[in-house]
Amino acid sequence: YIFFLQESMHAYAANVYSSVVEELMKGKQRKFIAVEQEFFILWWNAVATDTHKQQVHQLLQEGRLEFVIGGQVMHDEAVTLIDDQILQLTEGHGFLYETFGIRPQFSWHVDPFGASATTPTLFALAGFNAHLISRIDYDLKADMQKNKKLQFVWQGSPSLSERQEIFTHVMDQYSYCTPSQIPFSNRSGFYWNGIAAFPDPPKDGVYPNMSLPVTDTNIHLYAQTMVANIKERAAWFRTSDVLWPWGCDKQFFNASVQYSNMDLLLDYINKHSDEFGVTVQYATVGDYFQAVYSRNLTWEIRDSQDFFPYSTEPFQAWTGFYTSRSTLKGIARRASSLLYAGESFFTQYVRKRPESSICKCGALKQLQSLRWAVSEVQHHDGITGTESPKVKDMYMNNLMYGMFNVKKLMASIIFDMNNAKKNGEVYSSVYVKDSGIPDVDQYVVVYNPLAWNITTFVTVSVSHLAVSVYDELGHAVPAQVQSSAESHSTYDLYILVAISGLSYRKYNVKPLNGKESAFMGRSVKYKQKDVTRADQQRRQLLSVVNNCYQVLFDQNTNLMHSITERETNQTVQLTQEFLEYHVNGDVMKGPISDNYLFAPNVSAVPVSKAVGLEVVSGNLMTEIRQYFY
């Protein structure tokens, strides 16, 4: 984690903020927008000098530096939960308000792969005045451009409607990067600092693909190219104000060369505005939206329709990321759940025991480590699974580190509340499910972070079958132990727990010492059959029953046939299938399926016509396991 961040800061992020701040101070006309807070916070805390910090305060006051979105990251909109979107927004906004006394008022959601109707609602609730997006379906964007409908008032929530509407701007086909094609050079245009060399910048300062510097001989050609593009874009909008984004990914790492060329070009166009028919100026997103607002036009209303899925051309739907790096997606979800549990647990503890022995400052640092990790993984190249393996490892390490910290905190709170003696390192056995509880008395603490009472099963791994479970008063607790579906070396212990809202219960798991052992689950296995021969046999049904339901399985296939609710005697017939897609991996045969795109060859096909079946039944519960592979 430290290595990756130092590498990124060294090669790019530190240079951007340091050089941009220094260059903004050299010209009153110059402006800049900053979006994600993660690297800005790291720069502010570790790189920025006192002079830099004083200059940032001044630039913000003058409106020449503007924070847009202001969350820790620019979050993905398809595979994130709204709680986590709010968390990462809170993290970034909290820093900005505490440090500068400001709150962002505009979004810059230009890179997520599709646009959710939840996001404009969230940003409206956060006090934003306008929302800006870019990646929407190519056909739809072309139609909106043609009909000058790239701007509208979005009522993203059906229930809140006009109470939380927001003016929305969709970027045109050129999106958020400066057009790089210039007719008078083979090099890209308008990118005078070139491409960021990663991780080691060139010692001579000459970066790859640096644009031709603006000179007396080419300035008219540069101006003609820029003005032509501005006029092309102006035709797609209702007002004469054109937003012309200058920059792209990993740009402005050498702001000096960038601004010096931009200054020359803008001055030249303005001096010849009669000839070109346009005037140009540096502006923030806020400046642009203020200009559009001052036109006092009436805008079309868009309801709660979203812009998913996102396609860039025919047969190229960006839906692969819905499932890419599923392990990271799962851990991000679990980390989020643990964070909210840890925060509510700690809050209650502090209220009940304000003079406690646990260091509150240290506890907040432990919670903060997980807040940071859960926030950053919401990035549109994070939880989406579209990042490089090295960056994925950073996300995973940060999540695991934060989760360990919060588990340690919760364990220490429980020890403190129970006045337990802390012999040495009490956190060494923060529970890992696959390890199995050893052959000694163990305590399982279950916390209910919900605000209402629950009765449910919790599962823990144990190393042998003969165990008993007791509550805090020494009463036996209903439990069942059985072979594990995932491990051959441990067993699954199901404990039936009833816990009040925002409360915890402690259970003692003892190796067997008496009659009151947990119920044993008995396993019966049914092999996968050859369906070609089974088809000729008469259909036989296997019944699995409890007090509430009867589930019937076709014994030829071991797939579900029907479910009957016993109290009402209502039966639902059903067909059960498990299907998979076969996708294209050959670039010669069209778009390939990757972390971003989903490109199936044909419709989904069933994995198998018959499956293996195992029924594990006991006095407490029955578990049905099907083996498709």
Image (cartoon, rainbow, N blue to C red):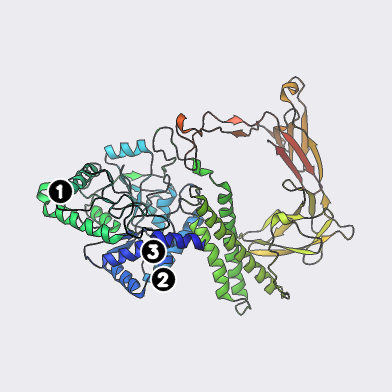
Pick the front one: 267 or 15: 15
Residue 285's x, y, as percent?
Answer: 29, 56
Q: What's under tag 2, amino acid-wise?
A: Glu
Relative to 176, is 350 above or below?
Answer: below
What distance separates the C-alpha of mark 3 from that of mark 2?
A: 22 Å
Residue at x-position 66% and y-position 58%: 453
First along the sequence among labels 3 and 1? 3
Q: Residue furthest top?
A: 536
Q: What's under tag 1, amino acid-wise?
A: His
Pick the front one: 330 or 213: 213
Give the residue at mark 3: 14
555 relative position to 148: left or right: right
Give the residue at mark 2: 98
Give the residue at mark 1: 220
Residue 50's x, y, as percent?
Answer: 36, 75
What secondary structure is marked by label 1? helix
Q: What's under tag 3, amino acid-wise?
A: Ala
What secondary structure is marked by label 3? helix
